[in-house]
């Protein structure tokens, strides 16, 4: 693999057969056109920013940095045009992008827990690459992405009920290098940056303060809302079978 990353030479013209006029070209021994499917695994790290909207605590923003591993399946389709490869690709899997921090509450006897849990993730992207050797493709990609992990802000006061975020949706962009190790099996290394957008959460008072505790004056049913934004970076390695 080090030879692919460090010592690859651009393919000469006689290693390719076909032209744009003739239709998709076929590199001798390696045909990039067609369907493929496989699996991937990697590491992910990111940032969450939380803003409180209705008072109760300082509005922030408050930030923390979740991280973890992720993996899943990949499928796509390529069209090869001489040294260019154009395609669509989708990923679906589980991302353990989790972490948390604490912030002060309005009452110094309590605090607020900020957390993000792991969840399903996926993306659908367009891909454009150039062959630097018959078996080696360097490419960029970008498109839609989602993350179903729940972000939550929760006070340690026992008479408040938190509601976490819905599914984050946004975009992803990145690139990588892919290399055939046999005429039908390829491996790749890829970097992606995710902007998952923001989602809202809340905390609702559902009862009065327990006996012996001073009530904060908030009426039962009142809500304190927050907005949570999420972005992440990842590195992954994958293997695919081409049909």
Image (tube, grey):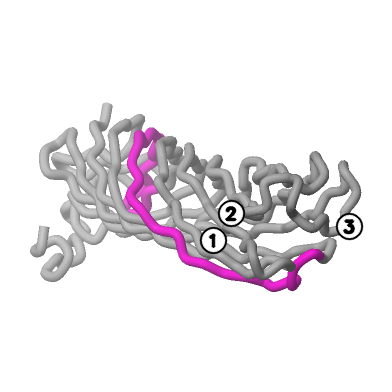
**Which residue position holds label 2?**
196
* Label annotation for residue 111: none
**Which residue position holds label 1?**
231
Query: Which is the main secondary structure of the residues drawn in magenta?
Result: strand
Which residue sits at x=36%, y=40%? 24
Above or below: residue 71 compared with residue 101: above
Give the image location of residue 154, x and y in percent.
64, 52
Q: Are marks 2 and 3 in contact (CB under 8 Å)?
A: no
What's the CA distance linking mark 2 and mark 3? 36 Å
Q: Secondary structure at mark 3?
A: loop
Left-right relation of 67 to 227? left
Which residue sits at x=58%, y=58%? 114
Which residue sits at x=74%, y=57%? 226
Q: Residue furthest front?
A: 212
Could you say which is closer to the camera, residue 222 or residue 168? 222
Give the image location of residue 148, x and y in percent.
55, 40
């Amino acid at each position: 693999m080090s030879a692919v990353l460090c010592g690859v030479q651009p393919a000469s013209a006689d290693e390719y057969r076909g032209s744009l006029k003739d239709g998709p070209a076929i590199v001798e021994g390696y045909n990039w056109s067609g369907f493929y499917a496989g699996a991937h695994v990697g590491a992910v790290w990111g940032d969450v920013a939380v803003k409180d909207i209705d008072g109760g605590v300082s509005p922030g923003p408050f930030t923390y940095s979740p991280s973890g591993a992720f993996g899943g399946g990949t499928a796509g389709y390529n069209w090869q045009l001489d040294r260019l490869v154009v395609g669509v690709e989708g990923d679906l899997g589980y991302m353990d992008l989790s972490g948390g921090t604490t912030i002060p509450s309005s009452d110094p006897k309590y605090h607020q827990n900020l957390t993000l849990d792991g969840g399903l993730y996926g993306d659908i992207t367009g891909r454009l690459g150039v062959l630097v050797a018959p078996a080696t493709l360097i490419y960029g990609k970008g498109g839609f992405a989602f993350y179903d992990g729940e972000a939550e802000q929760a006070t340690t006061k026992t008479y408040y009920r938190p509601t976490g975020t819905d599914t984050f949706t946004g975009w992803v962009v990145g690139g990588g290098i892919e290399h055939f190790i046999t005429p039908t099996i390829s491996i790749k290394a890829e970097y992606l940056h995710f902007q998952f957008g923001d989602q809202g959460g809340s905390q609702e008072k559902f009862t009065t303060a327990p006996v012996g505790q001073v009530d904060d004056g908030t009426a039962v049913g009142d809500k304190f809302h927050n907005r949570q934004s999420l972005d992440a970076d990842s590195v992954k390695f994958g293997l695919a079978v081409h049909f």
